[in-house]
Amino acid sequence: MFSGCATALITPMLKNGEIDEAGLRELVRFQEDSGIRMLVPCGSTGESATLNHDEHLKVIGIVIDEAKRSKVIAGTGSNATSEAIHLTKGAKDLGADAALSISPYYNKPTQTGIVKHYEAIDSAVGLPTIVYNIPSRTGSNITAATMLKLAEIPSIVGVKEASGDINQIAAIASNAPKDFTVLSGDDAMTVPAMAVGARGVISVASNIVPKHMLAMVQAMLDSNVPEGRRIHRELMPLLSALFIETNPIPVKTAVRLMGKPAGPFRLPLCEMSAEHLNALKGVLADYKLI
């Protein structure tokens, strides 16, 4: 249902720190013109942690309104189940095709608590939902056994897997229902994850190289592993550079350097160090992106 390459959109901002609506619309058009057919606003890459609820829903609404050819998977997760329900309801009312719901962060719930969290969202809203598992940000891992339990919840249609554990990804992909989609949550893990059963990626890099990421994912979907591996190898220096500092600092900086709408960060995110900025510029120049 949601296989392929989805872009985890940055949130462009004006110099005064407000959301750049015109810029966001431009980025949506760039993605669609490049062939992307799934857009993910308000994820980690979209600086969702620094958006208030009104801004969060505003960004989702703008993307839904501007997207003409793409499914919109709205980031609606929270460490408070009540907040996740509120944002998911808001996204559903705006017309989102699905929600991306991160496992509760900071609280470090038990596996039982994680299941109850998603059951509560399903009961209250019922919007198709992709679970987002990223232990490096949440402080807890959704195990393969727990993910398979979540796959039984009616509205849970897939997972964005960013655990970095290829055995876990393989276990989920091998044992989940056929209509449950595993997506890589890490650009550099896309080819390995797809080799063991994932069906695509929710990508940071596709903010700047959407056609390359699409081609890599499509090659793997077509079982053309040599081509997928070739593109992966070609992109590795760029993928590494995009995580030289905390995401989305490098990718938002890259978008800005390419002359596209990006704007400043909201604290506590800040500008890149001079050393890392020079390294990023060098890689972008190598790829003829600047």
Image: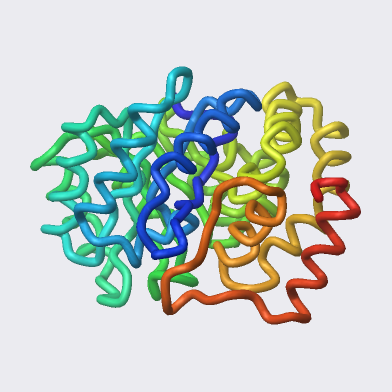
Residue 53: horizontal and vertical position, in percent?
Answer: 20, 56
- Give the number of marks: 0
Q: Is residue 274 above or below residue 59?
A: below
Give the residue drawn at x 53%, y 48%.
171
**Residue located farthest toward the front when viewing the structure as drawn:** 16
Which one is nearer the viewer's eye here, 53 or 123? 53
Give the residue drawn at x 58%, y 41%.
201
Residue 94 in the figure: left or right of residue 185:
left
In the rendered view, how is the structure colored?
rainbow
**Residue located farthest toward the top when viewing the structure as drawn:** 69
Residue 39: horizontal and vertical position, in percent?
Answer: 47, 35
Residue 149 in the figure: left or right of residue 228:
left
Give the residue drawn at x 50%, y 46%.
9
Q: Is residue 61 above or below residue 160?
A: above
Give the residue drawn at x 38%, y 54%.
145
Q: Quadrant of residue 276?
A: bottom right
- Quadrant where the N terminus is found in the figure: top left
Residue 120: horizontal and vertical position, in percent?
Answer: 12, 50
Residue 220: horizontal and vertical position, in percent?
Answer: 72, 31
Q: Quadrant of residue 257?
A: bottom right
